C-alpha cells in the first residue's frame, strides 16, 4: 500500500458522473456508515439527475442505519455492463471489496476515498486523507453536480459523517466537518434520529456483547493497551453475530489510562481468519501497524486480518508484532 497522488478533481468526477447514463457504486466489505451512507447519497443524487444507479456490496449495511440508508439497494451479485461507470466509495484497497474483488479488481473507473494509507487500483483516483469522512467528498461531488440536497440525501451523508467522527468527538473532526454538518441539517438531515440510532440505541444482543467484552478484556503494558479476543465459541455461547460485536472496538480503549485498544474476532466463514481492529488515543499509527498484516485505515482507527490455526496463535502473532512498537 502507498500514499496516493490524485489524478482527477472533484469537478472532473462530477462531470464524468453527469456525462454517463449508468453508474455502479462499490462499497467495502462489512460496510460501515461512511461507505454505505456516502454511496447511498450519491445514488439518490444521481437518480435525481436521471441516471441509472446500482450499489454493489458483499454485505448489507448495519441494522442501526435502517432509518436513513435503504439496505435493499445494496446487492452482492451485480455485474458491470458495457458503458457502466464503476465508482468505488471509501475503499482503501482492492482487497476491501471482499467477495466483489475478483469481479471488479480490474474494472474500477473512479475511486473516491479518504484513507491515509491507500492502494491505487482505479483508473482515476481521488483520495483526500484530510477529509474526516468520504461523506465530505461525496457532499462536494453532489454539490458540484448541481443537485439540490433533500432530507434523504442529507440524512445519509450526516450519518456517514457522524459515524466516522464518532459523533464529532474523534481527532479527525475538523471545522469543515462541522460546517458541512450544519448545512446538512439546514437541508433536512434527521440529525436527532441519526444520533440516537448510531450512539444511543443498543439491542439486547449488543449489551450481551458488551458484557462479554468487559469480562474478557486483557490489559497489557501496565494498562496502556487493552486486548480483547472473541472466538466463535464465545459468539455461539452468547448468541452473538459479528454485527453485535461492533461496539467492542471502542470498548477496548475506553478504560482510563488505556492508549491503545486491540480487538481480535474469529471469522464465522473461516475459523483460521481473525479480524483485527485497532483504536488509539495517542500518536500510535494504527494504519501503519495494520499494514504489516496487509490491512490499513486511519492513524487512530484501522483494521486487518490475521491468519492462524487457533485464537491463541493469532494472539501470539499480534503481540509479537506489537512488541516491536512503543506503546
Image (spheres, rainbow, N blue to C red):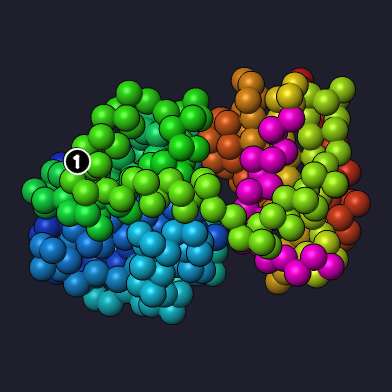
Residue 150, given in percent of the width and then of the height, sits at 17, 54
Q: Is residue 201 left or right of residue 103?
A: right
Instruction: Give the quadrant of the N terminus.
Output: top right
- The answer to if 11 sits in the magenta stretch is no
Choose between 173 and 191: the one closer to the eye.
191
Instruction: Give the quadrant of the C terminus.
Output: top right
Residue 142, given in percent of the width and then of the height, sits at 18, 49
Choose between 283 and 176: the one closer to the eye.
176
Q: Is residue 54 left or right of residue 266?
A: left
| Numbered circles on residues, count | 1
Mark 1: few/some/many CA within 10 Å (<14, 14-19, 20+): few
Q: Is residue 289 left or right of residue 227?
A: left
Q: Which residues are magenta?
A: 237-255
Residue 103, given in percent of the width and then of the height, sits at 45, 71
* 300 in relation to 9, above or below: above
Q: Is residue 155 left or right of residue 222?
A: left
Residue located beneath label 1 in the image: 186
Amino acid at each position: 500500500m502507498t500514499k496516493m497522488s490524485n489524478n482527477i478533481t472533484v469537478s472532473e468526477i462530477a462531470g464524468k458522473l453527469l456525462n454517463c447514463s449508468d453508474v455502479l457504486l462499490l462499497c467495502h466489505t462489512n460496510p460501515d456508515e461512511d461507505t454505505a451512507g456516502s454511496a447511498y447519497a450519491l445514488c439518490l443524487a444521481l437518480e435525481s439527475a436521471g441516471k441509472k444507479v446500482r450499489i454493489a456490496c458483499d454485505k448489507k449495511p448495519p441494522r442501526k442505519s435502517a432509518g436513513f440508508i435503504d439496505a435493499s439497494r445494496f446487492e452482492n451479485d451485480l455485474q458491470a455492463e458495457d458503458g457502466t461507470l464503476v465508482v468505488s466509495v471509501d475503499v482503501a484497497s482492492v482487497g476491501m471489496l471482499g467477495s466483489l474483488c475478483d469481479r471488479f479488481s480490474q474494472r474500477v473507473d473512479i475511486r473516491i476515498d479518504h484513507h491515509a494509507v491507500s492502494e491505487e487500483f482505479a483508473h482515476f483516483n481521488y483520495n483526500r486523507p484530510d477529509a474526516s469522512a468520504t461523506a465530505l467528498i461525496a457532499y462536494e461531488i453532489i454539490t458540484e453536480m448541481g443537485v439540490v440536497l433533500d432530507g434523504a440525501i442529507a440524512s445519509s451523508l450526516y450519518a456517514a459523517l457522524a459515524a466516522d467522527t464518532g459523533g464529532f468527538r474523534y481527532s479527525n473532526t475538523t471545522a469543515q466537518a462541522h460546517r458541512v454538518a450544519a448545512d446538512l441539517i439546514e437541508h433536512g438531515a434527521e440529525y436527532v434520529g441519526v444520533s440516537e440510532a448510531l450512539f444511543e440505541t443498543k439491542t439486547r444482543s449488543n449489551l450481551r456483547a458488551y458484557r462479554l467484552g468487559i469480562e474478557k478484556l486483557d490489559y497489557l503494558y501496565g494498562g496502556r493497551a487493552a486486548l480483547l479476543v472473541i472466538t466463535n465459541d464465545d459468539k455461539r455461547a452468547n448468541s452473538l453475530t459479528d454485527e453485535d460485536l461492533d461496539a467492542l472496538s471502542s470498548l477496548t480503549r475506553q478504560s482510563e489510562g488505556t492508549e491503545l485498544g486491540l480487538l481480535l474476532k474469529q471469522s464465522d466463514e473461516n475459523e483460521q481468519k481473525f479480524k483485527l481492529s485497532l483504536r488509539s488515543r495517542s500518536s500510535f499509527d494504527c494504519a501503519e501497524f495494520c499494514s504489516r498484516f496487509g490491512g490499513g485505515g486511519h492513524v487512530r482507527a484501522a483494521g486487518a486480518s490475521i491468519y492462524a490455526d487457533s485464537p491463541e496463535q493469532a494472539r501470539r502473532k499480534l503481540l509479537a508484532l506489537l512488541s516491536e512498537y512503543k506503546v
